[in-house]
C-alpha cells in the first residue's frame, strides 16, 4: 500500500493500542557485516560541477562516522565526451566541463584499487512544477502539496526533495518519490508528508521536483521503504537494489530538476 | 476421476458380499433438552462392544450387527449415558437423546470418560469444546476460538493479541477455515485482534494439523472446521454478554417444536467510544468498530430429510478522521440438505456462497479515491457416507466451486491525481472428487486410506501475460470467456493408520499430500484486510505439501489424563515470496513481482491434558524448525521462516473452586520470531541507512505472558442465569516485543539505537453474561 500509506491504518491501530502500548530502548547484539563501498552520484540539467561521493559502510555498533574513500579514479561519460573527476575534498569528486542534457545517457566509471564500478542513467525530460500549496495535517502539522501536470503517454518517475531556508531537511526527511503508474496524464496534487520538525511558520520552503529514471526510482522506493528502520507492518527489510554494478551500495542518477520556493506565513 | 469411481464401485461390491444376515440400527443423537445434534457421540452395543461407532457431523450414526437383542449405550462427554434395549430383527431407527450431566454433578455421575484420542485414526487432530474455550482467559474478555487454539501444540500465534495462526510451519494463508462448510477468507476483525467467530454461535471446533480427511482440500497446513449451533428446538432462549469492548446477544428457539429451530447471534464492538474521549478532533472523528451476525435455521421434513440454512455476515469499519476509511467483511451462506437414503447411506448436499470484500476511500485535498475489491465463491458439494459394515465406512463425493476475483476497481473524481482503473476479474473453476475408506482391519488396527483428485482451471476472459526473469512482459495471450487458460490436475493421497497397543495406548502414523490453488499475497509482516488473494495461473503453480507424521498416545487413570507425543516432517513446494519493493497493489502484472521456492518444517509436539475433575487443563510443548529456500532471496540459501519458533510452551489450568467461583489461567512462552536486522550502516546524502546481510538471521526476544480470569456464577433460577467474568491479560505486565525499530539516537546523532515497541500490558476486562 505504498500509494495510500497504510500509515493511516496503523495510526488507527495505535489509537487503540495507545491505551496499553509502550516503547523502550533495548540492547541488541548484532553481527558485523563486511565493510562495503558506498557510491552516490548525480548529474542534472543545471550547470555543473556535478558531484560523486564515495565512502565506506561501518559496523552497526560504530559511531555514525563514515570514512571517505580517497584516491579513486572517477569518470562520467556523456554527450560524447569523458569528464575525469577531481577529488575536491576527501571522498568528494567533481566534474569539470560536463553539462547535463535531457534525453542523453550518462555513464559513471569508478576504479578503486583495481575494483571497477560502473553505472548508466538516462536523463528524463523535465516536467515543470507549477506550485506548492499547503494543507493542515494532524497535530498542527503543515503538509506541502506539489502541483504539476503529468505528461500523458510516457512513464514518469519523480523525486521530491525539500529545503528549509536553503538547508536540506536533516537525516533523510523531506525525500519522497512518486510514479505515474496509476496517474498517467493527470494533474497531480502530491501530498508530501512532513512534520513540524521541519516546516514551521516563517521559514522559506523550497521543493525540488526531479524527474528520475526507472532504476533510480526503484532504488529510492526500496530505500524509503526500509528507512523507517523496520516498523510495524513493514516488509522484511533488504538492501535497495542499486543501479551500480560491481557490488557497491548507492546509486547514480541523471535527473532534471525544477523547483519552487514559498514563504510559510 | 475414472480411477476414483472404479475404486468406489469395487469397495461397494466388496462390502455387499459380507453384509448378509445382518441388520442396521441408525438414528440421530441429540441433546435431550435443546434438540441440538451431538457430533462425535459414541454408540456401542454392550453385547458386542468392539463394534463402536461415532455419530457424524450431523449427529447421524449407523451400526450393523447380526440378528438378536442388544443393549445400545450412547455416550458423549459432559452428558449422562443413555441405554436403549433393541430387538434387532430388521433395519430400525433408534433416535438417541442424551441429557447434560450438569457441571456440579460431574464428580458424582460417571459421565462417559472417553478414549477417542486413543482410538480415533487421524493424528494431529484436536477438538475443543465450547465449554473449554469458555473458561480460557483471553484479551478483552471476548472468548475466542482462534486465540484458544493457539494454546495447542503445533499452532503458533501470529502475534500479541492476534487471531492469526501458523500450523506446523505453514503460512497464515495455508489454513482452511470453514464455517458450516463455507470458506472464510479473512477470519479477523479489527486488524486481527478479534476473530470473526462469535463463540455463542458455535457448537463444535475441530482442527486438523495437515492430515485432513480426503473430503477436504485446498489448503496446505490445516483445516479448522467450525460448526454453528442449530438452535433449541424445544424452548425459546435468550443469552448474551456485556463487555468492555463488545456486547453480544443470542436468540434461539423452535420454528416448529421438535421439528425445526433457529438461532441468531449478533455482536458489536464499541472500541470507538474511547476515541470520542480524545480532544484531538481527528481522533474523535475516527471510526473503529465491527459487528457480526450468525444465523441458522433447520427443519426436519421427515425421518429421512432435514434442511439447514446458515449464514454469516460481518463487517469492519475503520476510519481516520474524514480522510481515510476502510471497510471489509465476509458474507457466507450455506444451504444444506441431509438425506438418509437408507440405514447405511447418508448424504449431505450443500450449496455454499462466500464473499469477501473490502472498500477503501481516501479523501485528501482533491484526491478522492475509492478502491473496491472482492472474492466471490459459489460451490456445490455432495458428500456421501456409506456405512458398509461396522468395520468399513466409505466416504465419497465431489465438489465444484466457481471463484470470481475482482482484484481492484478504482473510482476517482475528475480532479483526482489518480486515473480510474478496473483490474480485470479473474475466473477459476475448482473441482474435486474423493473417496476414502475407514477400515477396522482388526480390533487393534484401523486404517483410513483416501484419495482426492483436484482440478483447478483458470478461465478467460482476459489477457494473460508471460514474464522474463526481470519481470518484463514477454508475451500476452488473450482468451475469450470460458476458455481454459491453464489447468492443474493433482492427485492427493491420504493415509493414516492407528494401532491400539491396549485399551489406553496407541500408535499412529500418517502421510498426506495437500494442494493449494489460492494464494495470499502480503508483503508486510502484519495482517491487512487488503492483502491480495490470487489464484494459480499460467505463472503461479499450485502449492504442494507432503507431510508424514507419527505419534504415541496414552491415557492414564481411567482416561482422566491424556498424553500424546507426535513428530512430523513437512515438505512444501512452490512457495511464494516477493521481490524487494514488490508492487502488490493495483498491479496488472502482480505475478511478475513474485519469487518461488521450497519450504520444510519438522518438529515434536507434546501434549498432556487433565480432562475431568475440579482441576482441568493442559500443557503443550512444541519443538520445531521451519525453513524456506526461495530463489532470489538470501543468495538462494535456506533461511528460517518468520514464524520459526524453536520452543513453544502453553499451560492452561481451570479450577472449579465451588458452585460459585471458577478460576482459570494460561501461561505462554515462546522463542522469538526470526527477523532481519541490520549488521552495518552507511550514509546516503546525510541519511543513515542500515545494511542488511542474511534474511531472518536474528531472533526477536522471547515472549511470555500469564493471563488470569475468574468467573462468578450468580444465583441460578429456572428463568434466569447470570455470571460475571473478570480477567487480566498479561498479569505481570511483561513488555513483550511487538516490533523493534532501528534509528539514530535523537539525543546523540552519532549513535544508533534499537527501540522496542510493545502492545498490551495489564489489560483488565469485565464481562457480564446472562441467559433466560
Image: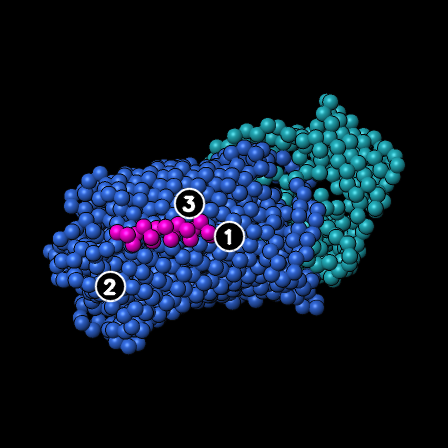
Residues drawn in magenta: B1-18
Q: Chain of mark 1?
A: B
Residue A204 visible, this angle: yes
The percent position of residue B131, horizontal first and vertical second, equals 26, 57
Q: Residue at x 32, y 61 (%)?
A: B346
Q: Which of pointers 1 and 3 lies earlier in the amino acid sequence?
A: 1
Q: Chain of mark 3?
A: B
Which of these two is toward me, A165 or B18? B18
Q: Is residue B75 left or right of residue B238?
A: left
- Give the Cα separation between the discs numbered 2 and 3: 32 Å
Q: Which of pointers 2 and 1 lies earlier in the amino acid sequence?
A: 2
Q: Which chain is cyan?
A: A
Q: Residue B637 sits in which quadrant?
A: top right
Instruction: Determine the colour of chain B.
Output: blue
Q: Is residue B4 magenta?
A: yes
Return the residue at label 2: B27
Q: Within 10 angstroms of label 3, few (less than 14), some, or many (20 or more) residues? A: some
Q: Residue at x 58, y 64 (%)?
A: B372
The percent position of residue B270, horizontal first and vertical second, equals 41, 66
Return the residue at label 1: B455
- Give the Cα separation between the discs numbered 1 and 3: 14 Å
The percent position of residue B404, horizontal first and vertical second, equals 55, 61
Q: Chain of mark 2?
A: B
Which of these two is toward me, B340 or A193? B340
Return the residue at label 3: B493
Report the magenta stretch's main SS: helix
Amino acid at each position: 500500500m505504498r500509494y495510500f500509506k497504510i500509515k493511516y491504518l496503523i495510526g488507527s491501530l495505535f489509537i487503540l493500542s495507545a491505551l496499553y502500548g509502550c516503547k523502550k530502548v533495548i540492547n541488541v547484539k548484532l553481527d558485523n557485516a563486511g565493510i562495503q563501498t558506498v557510491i552516490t552520484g548525480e548529474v542534472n540539467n543545471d550547470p555543473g560541477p556535478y558531484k560523486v561521493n564515495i565512502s565506506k559502510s561501518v559496523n552497526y555498533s560504530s559511531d555514525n562516522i563514515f570514512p571517505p574513500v580517497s584516491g579513486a579514479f572517477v569518470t562520467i561519460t556523456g554527450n560524447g565526451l569523458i569528464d575525469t573527476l577531481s577529488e575536491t575534498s576527501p571522498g568528494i569528486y567533481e566534474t569539470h566541463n560536463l553539462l547535463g542534457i535531457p534525453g542523453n545517457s550518462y555513464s559513471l566509471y569508478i576504479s578503486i584499487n583495481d575494483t571497477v564500478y560502473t553505472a548508466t542513467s538516462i536523463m528524463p525530460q523535465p516536467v515543470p512544477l507549477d506550485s506548492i500549496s499547503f494543507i493542515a495535517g494532524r497535530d498542527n502539522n503543515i503538509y506541502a502539496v506539489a502541483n504539476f501536470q503529468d505528461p500523458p503517454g510516457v512513464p514518469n518517475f519523480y523525486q521530491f526533495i525539500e529545503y528549509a531556508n536553503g538547508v536540506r531537511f536533516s537525516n533523510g526527511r523531506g525525500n519522497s518519490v512518486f510514479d505515474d503508474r496509476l496517474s498517467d496524464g493527470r494533474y497531480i496534487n502530491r501530498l508530501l508528508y512532513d512534520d513540524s520538525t521541519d516546516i514551521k511558520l516563517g521559514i522559506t520552503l523550497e521543493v525540488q521536483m526531479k524527474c528520475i529514471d526507472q532504476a533510480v526510482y526503484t532504488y529510492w522506493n526500496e530505500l524509503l521503504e526500509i528507512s523507517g528502520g523496520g516498523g510495524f507492518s513493514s516488509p522484511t527489510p533488504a538492501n535497495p537494489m542499486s543501479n551500480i554494478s560491481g557490488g557497491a551500495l548507492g546509486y547514480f542518477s541523471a535527473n532534471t530538476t525544477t523547483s519552487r520556493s514559498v514563504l510559510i506565513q | 476421476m475414472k480411477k476414483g469411481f472404479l475404486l468406489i464401485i469395487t469397495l461397494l461390491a466388496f462390502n455387499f458380499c459380507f453384509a448378509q444376515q445382518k441388520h442396521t440400527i441408525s438414528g440421530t443423537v441429540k441433546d435431550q433438552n435443546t434438540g441440538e445434534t451431538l457430533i462425535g457421540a459414541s454408540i456401542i452395543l454392550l453385547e458386542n462392544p468392539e463394534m463402536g461407532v461415532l455419530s457424524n457431523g450431523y449427529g447421524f450414526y449407523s451400526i450393523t450387527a447380526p440378528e438378536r437383542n442388544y443393549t445400545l449405550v450412547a455416550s458423549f462427554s459432559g452428558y449422562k449415558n443413555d441405554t436403549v434395549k433393541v430387538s434387532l430383527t430388521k433395519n430400525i431407527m433408534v433416535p438417541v437423546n442424551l441429557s447434560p450431566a450438569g457441571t456440579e454433578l460431574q464428580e458424582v455421575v460417571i459421565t462417559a470418560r472417553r478414549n477417542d484420542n486413543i482410538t480415533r485414526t487421524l493424528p494431529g487432530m484436536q477438538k475443543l469444546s465450547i465449554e473449554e474455550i469458555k473458561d480460557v482467559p483471553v484479551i478483552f474478555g471476548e472468548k475466542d476460538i482462534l486465540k484458544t487454539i493457539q494454546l495447542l501444540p503445533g499452532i503458533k500465534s501470529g502475534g500479541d493479541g492476534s487471531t492469526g495462526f501458523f500450523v506446523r510451519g505453514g503460512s497464515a494463508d495455508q489454513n482452511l477455515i470453514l464455517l458450516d462448510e463455507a470458506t472464510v477468507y479473512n477470519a479477523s476483525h479489527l486488524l486481527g485482534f478479534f476473530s470473526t467467530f462469535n463463540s455463542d454461535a458455535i457448537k463444535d471446533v475441530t482442527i486438523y494439523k495437515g492430515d485432513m480427511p480426503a473430503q477436504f482440500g485446498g489448503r496446505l497446513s490445516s483445516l479448522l472446521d467450525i460448526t454453528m449451533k442449530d438452535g433449541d428446538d424445544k424452548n425459546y432462549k435468550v443469552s448474551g454478554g456485556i463487555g468492555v469492548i463488545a456486547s453480544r446477544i443470542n436468540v434461539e428457539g423452535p420454528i416448529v417444536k421438535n421439528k425445526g429451530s433457529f438461532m441468531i447471534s449478533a455482536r458489536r464492538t464499541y472500541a470507538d467510544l474511547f476515541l470520542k474521549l480524545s480532544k484531538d478532533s481527528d481522533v474523535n472523528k475516527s471510526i473503529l468498530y465491527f459487528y457480526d451476525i450468525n444465523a441458522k435455521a433447520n427443519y426436519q421434513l421427515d425421518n429421512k430429510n432435514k434442511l439447514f440454512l446458515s449464514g454469516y455476515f460481518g463487517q469492519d469499519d475503520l476510519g481516520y478522521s474524514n480522510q481515510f476509511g476502510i471497510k471489509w467483511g465476509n458474507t457466507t451462506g450455506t444451504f444444506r440438505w441431509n438425506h438418509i437414503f437408507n440405514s447405511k447411506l447418508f448424504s449431505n448436499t450443500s450449496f455454499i456462497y462466500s464473499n469477501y470484500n473490502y472498500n477503501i476511500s481516501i479523501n485528501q485535498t482533491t484526491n478522492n479515491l475509492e478502491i473496491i475489491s472482492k472474492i466471490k465463491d459459489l460451490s456445490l458439494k455432495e458428500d456421501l457416507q456409506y456405512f458398509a459394515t461396522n468395520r468399513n465406512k466409505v466416504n465419497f463425493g465431489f465438489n465444484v466451486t466457481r471463484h470470481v476475483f475482482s482484484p481492484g476497481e478504482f473510482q476517482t473524481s475528475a480532479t483526482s491525481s489518480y486515473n480510474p482503473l478496473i483490474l480485470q476479474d479473474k475466473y477459476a473453476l475448482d473441482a474435486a472428487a474423493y473417496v476414502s475408506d475407514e477400515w477396522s482391519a482388526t480390533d487393534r488396527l484401523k486404517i483410513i486410506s483416501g484419495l482426492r483428485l483436484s482440478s483447478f482451471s483458470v478461465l478467460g476472459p482476459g489477457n494473460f501475460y508471460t514474464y522474463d526473469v526481470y519481470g518484463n512482459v514477454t508475451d500476452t495471450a488473450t482468451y475469450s470467456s470460458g476458455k481454459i487458460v491453464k489447468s492443474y490436475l493433482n492427485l492427493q493421497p491420504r493415509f493414516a493408520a492407528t494401532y491400539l497397543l491396549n485399551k489406553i495406548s496407541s500408535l499412529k502414523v500418517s502421510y498426506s499430500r495437500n494442494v493449494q490453488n489460492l494464494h495470499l499475497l502480503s508483503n508486510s509482516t502484519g495482517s491487512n484486510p487488503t492483502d491480495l488473494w490470487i489464484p494459480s495461473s499460467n505463472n503461479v503453480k499450485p502449492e504442494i505439501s507432503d507431510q508424514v507424521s507419527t505419534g504415541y498416545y496414552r491415557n492414564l487413570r481411567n482416561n482422566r489424563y491424556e498424553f500424546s507425543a507426535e513428530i512430523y516432517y513437512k515438505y512444501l513446494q512452490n512457495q511464494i515470496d516477493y521481490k524487494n519493493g514488490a508492487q502488490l497493489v493495483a498491479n496488472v502484472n502482480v505475478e511478475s513481482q513474485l519469487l518461488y521456492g521450497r519450504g520444510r518444517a519438522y518438529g515434536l509436539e507434546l501434549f498432556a491434558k487433565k480432562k475431568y475433575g475440579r482441576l482441568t487443563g493442559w500443557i503443550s510443548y512444541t519443538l520445531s524448525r521451519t525453513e524456506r529456500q526461495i530463489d532470489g532471496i538470501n543468495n538462494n540459501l535456506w533461511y528460517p521462516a518468520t514464524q520459526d519458533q524453536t520452543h513453544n510452551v502453553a499451560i492452561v489450568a481451570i479450577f472449579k473452586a465451588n458452585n460459585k467461583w471458577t478460576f482459570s489461567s494460561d501461561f505462554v512462552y515462546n522463542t522469538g520470531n526470526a527477523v532481519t536486522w541490520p549488521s552495518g550502516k552507511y550514509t546516503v546524502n546525510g541519511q543513515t541507512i542500515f545494511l542488511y546481510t542474511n534474511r531472518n538471521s536474528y531472533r526477536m526476544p522471547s515472549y511470555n505472558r500469564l493471563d488470569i480470569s475468574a468467573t462468578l456464577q450468580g444465583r441460578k433460577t429456572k428463568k434466569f442465569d447470570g455470571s460475571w467474568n473478570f480477567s487480566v491479560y498479561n498479569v505481570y505486565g511483561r513488555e513483550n516485543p511487538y516490533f523493534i525499530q532501528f534509528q539514530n539516537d535523537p539525543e546523540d546523532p552519532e549513535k544508533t539505537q534499537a527501540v522496542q515497541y510493545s502492545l498490551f500490558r495489564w489489560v483488565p476486562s469485565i464481562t457480564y453474561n446472562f441467559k433466560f
